[in-house]
Amino acid sequence: MMRSIPGRRFAAACLCLALASGPASGPRAEGMTLLEKVDTVRAPADDFTFIAAVTGPDGERLKLSVRVGGRTKSLVRYLEPRRSAGRSLLFIEHNMWVYVPGTRQVLRISPQQRVLGGVASADVARMVFSLDYRLDSVEELAGEGGERRRRLNLSRRSKGAAYARIELLAGGEEARPLEADLFAATGRRRLKTTYFEGYREVLGGWRPTVLRVIDHVKGGGETILEYSDFVLEDTPDAWFQPTYLKRLR
């Protein structure tokens, strides 16, 4: 069972990788290209910053400042509510740490731990499809208004990935992520569904700025994540160190 933690954040990234089995061809090659496109739609660059607002099923709200660095690293600072201001989270690949002001230690936590409502930290901090997941198959679907739609059936590359299996729906030739069903360790139990919404022009691309997460484990509760104020900006490498969290102001 996932435990609640004092941490929320988002970081999406684009990373173009080939299949581990070697040069791909046919549907598998096309599928990996689609995964790379999905990641590119979600993230404007390798290094950027933005603001994330999270609203849980009971109306609880969080406001976060997020820095993404080098595709696989992110740093989050709590802005609101006041009681949480100054808390910070660090995510490096599949490793995650949290620091709470007034405590002495930076704590290692699991990306699968519950954050707010039905959202786990990995939902908003680590969803790099082309890096974390392997394509198993691609299904062509009938789209609305003649738009091409494809379902990508994914399985995790390692146990570090938050979900054993994902069914990802992508729309159009640009492979816009539309929705994703996320499955538990067995690959059979659907934990939640994420809808990618609020598409608008952001830093040269048409990107989702709202994620709506439905928790199937706890009665279909809905958690909303809203992203804004995107800026292309580098973050010093030293900031992406667990020991640095105590020094952030």
Image (tube, grey):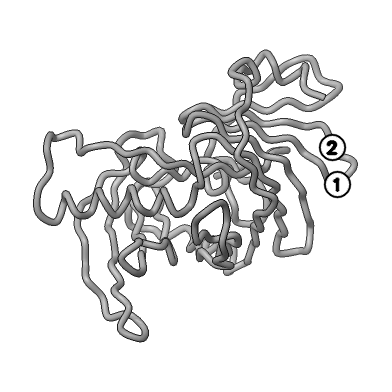
Query: How many residues crowd mark 2 within 10 Å: few (<14), some (14–19), many (20+)?
Result: some
Horizontally, is 186 left or right of 105 in the view?
Answer: left
User: From this viewpoint, which residue is outermost toward the front?
Assistant: 204
User: Do the numbered discs 2 and 1 sit on residues whose CB atoms are within 8 Å?
Assistant: yes
Question: Residue 200's image quarter?
Answer: bottom right
**Residue most extreme to the bottom:** 145
Foreground pick, 226 / 153:
226
User: Around disc 1, counting alpha carbons within 10 Å, would you say few (fewer than 14), some (14 to 19), or many (20 or more)?
Assistant: few
Q: Of the residues shown, which amino acid type is indicated by label 1?
A: Pro
Amino acid type at mark 2: Ala
Residue, disc 1: 81
Residue 150 x, y percent position in the rendering: 28, 67
Question: Would you name the residue on which mark 2 appears?
Answer: 85
Position of residue 48 in the picture relative to residue 88 (left or right): left
The image shows residue 136, relative to residue 121, as above or below, that is below
Residue at 60% over, 39% down: 232
Q: Is residue 243 above or below residue 47?
A: above
Which quarter of the image is occupied by the C terminus? top right
| Image location (x, y in percent) of residue 2 | 57, 43
Residue shown at 30% from the left, 72% from the top: 149
Relative depth, front residue between 218 and 155 = 155
> Circle 1 — which element?
loop
Q: In front here: 100 or 11?
A: 11
What is the x, y in percent for residue 26?
Answer: 9, 54
Q: Using the rendered view, name the quadrant where residue 181 is placed.
A: bottom left
Q: Is residue 19 above or below residue 205?
A: above
